[in-house]
Image (cartoon, helix red, strand yellow):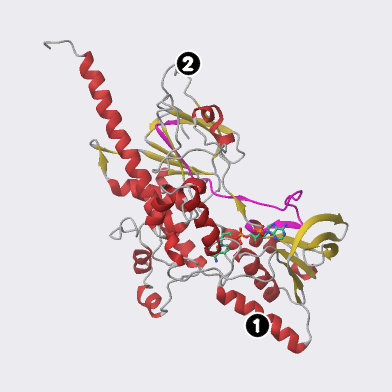
Amino acid sequence: MFDEPSVYDVLGIGFGPSNLSLAIALHEMGDVEGRPLAARFFEQQPSFGWHRNMLLPSAKMQVSFLKDLVTFRNPHSRFTFVSYLHEMNRLARFINNCDFFPTREEFHGYLEWAAANFADQVTYGATITSISVPPDSGPGDPIDRVRVNLASGPTGAESSSVEARNVVLGTGLVPRFPAGLTSDDRVWHSSEFLGKFQRCDTTKLKRVLVVGGGQSAAEIAHFVYDNVPGVTVTAVIPSYGYSIADATPFANRVFDPSAIDDYYYGDENSKDAFWRYHRNTNYAVVDSNLISDLNRKAYDEAVTGETRLRFAELSRLSGVRRRDDGVVVSIHSMLSNRTSEVDADIVICATGYEPMEIGDMLGPLDRFCIRDEQGRYRVERDYRLATTEHLRCGIYLQGGMEHTHGLSSSLLSNLAVRNGDISTSVARRAQSQSHDDGRVLQGLVPTGS
Ligand code: NAP
């Protein structure tokens, strides 16, 4: 690790697809003021991984392969999905599939392939413990560097710190549980699914509850039904039935790069309309093929008289009680306005995610960040947190800016362009700082020398 803190131009916290896309954008930018920008990334996981616990065998991407790490910013990049296919000798066969949507497993292979090219810039197994102001910075000095403190090593006991002029927060989403619930051996979140499923004795699973009406819930219900012989799967769905993800061409335009500007520069009414009319392109909705598959299974059961796939519609999980041999789940039905109890071996909460929480991480820097009337962070168009004059270094967001940049801002669809914006912003600021420094230095040169 780092014995001496070095000043990096960019320090990325987290190394998932977002900061990977940034690493590529910085690499492809070339020299700024005569040298490449120095970037370093820290990732908590021991190796590259993207939603590994949802890499269900047949699950497919819901965005086109062209919405990869780079294409929308630079279709000539050597890190396109097409370039990956070419290197894997699968390009012709992929095209013969006539399908824009690879499996998640294949896309994960692509991400790993791209990440391997930047291994020398990434420290895996490193946790950010805090961000602070460098100790040599006086109380009234403008803050143009931040110090990032880290824990790493096999036991997490090694501490070190690094300084940087810009920090890019890309730690991803935080799993959301229904109120009062936390993860344990019988209550799982969808983000833990495959790992826990593979470790559990599935021969003992007889009753599984899957909570939620989104893609994760539908994929897990489908997977458990198919892969655990004799199991009964009860789907607790807040709507009357799974609803379709609107992937039709006009609605899909909410994911176009230009929609970010429309949202960002729109007023409160237009922002509200984006959410009201187009939330169903992404949240609490399910791919149409999967809905058909699940419905087919339910219908086949109606024919055979089997009842292994059950639906609690217009219902929400309201509590879980432990028993020695399982859990008792309270389900509130909005149809009857009653709460009933159901026994289960495990409950899988496919109940979505919260945006990343950055306040704790920012620590003493948080007070320099400007907030709006509702207490939310103000974010510049280039994804930089708006700060007071005093904080000169850049803190950029890869998530948590849906209120300023819209519903697609942190999604894969916007990945390549977002990181073009961030890398360009970092470069512009590096140039202007270097010119400012030049003026200061010139001012110090004695006249006549
Ligand atoms: P989501 O879309 O946010 O859905 C969460 C669901 O949980 C909602 O239906 C929500 O209903 C429900 N819920 C929350 N609390 C509940 C409770 N107490 N009882 C019953 N239901 C409750 O989350 P997700 O399905 O994990 O999807 C997140 C993102 O990942 C989406 O963009 C999705 O497309 C993506 N994804 C992609 C793939 C793929 O590419 N194959 C697979 C999985 C997920 P309310 O909204 O009414 O609270």
Q: Cβ(mark 1) to ligand 1 < 8 Å?
A: no
Disc number for residue 139: 2
The answer to whether residue 22 is left or right of residue 194 is left
Seen from the viewer's position, the closer of residues 219 and 140 is: 140
Query: What's drawn in magenta, residue-wise?
Result: 163-191
Seen from the viewer's position, the closer of residues 208 and 55 is: 208
What amino acid is at disc 2? Pro
Q: Residues within 10 Å of mark 2 (few under 14, many from 20)?
A: few
Residue 10 position in % (x across, y down): 39, 38
Residue 259 position in % (x across, y down): 41, 56
- Residue 347 figure quarter: bottom right
In this view of the protein, can residue 50 be seen by the observer? Answer: no
> Which residue is identified by label 1?
296
The alpha-carbon separation of the residues under discs 2 and 1 comes to 67 Å
Disc number for residue 342: none
Q: Secondary structure at mark 2?
A: loop
Instruction: Decide whether residue 89 is among the magenta residues.
Output: no
Residue depicted at x 68% and y 81%: 297
- Residue 302 figure quarter: bottom right
Q: Cβ(mark 2) to ligand 1 < 8 Å?
A: no
In this view of the protein, can residue 223 be seen by the observer? Answer: yes
Residue 172 position in % (x across, y down): 54, 49
Mark 2 / mark 1, whichever is N-terminal: 2
What amino acid is at disc 1? Arg
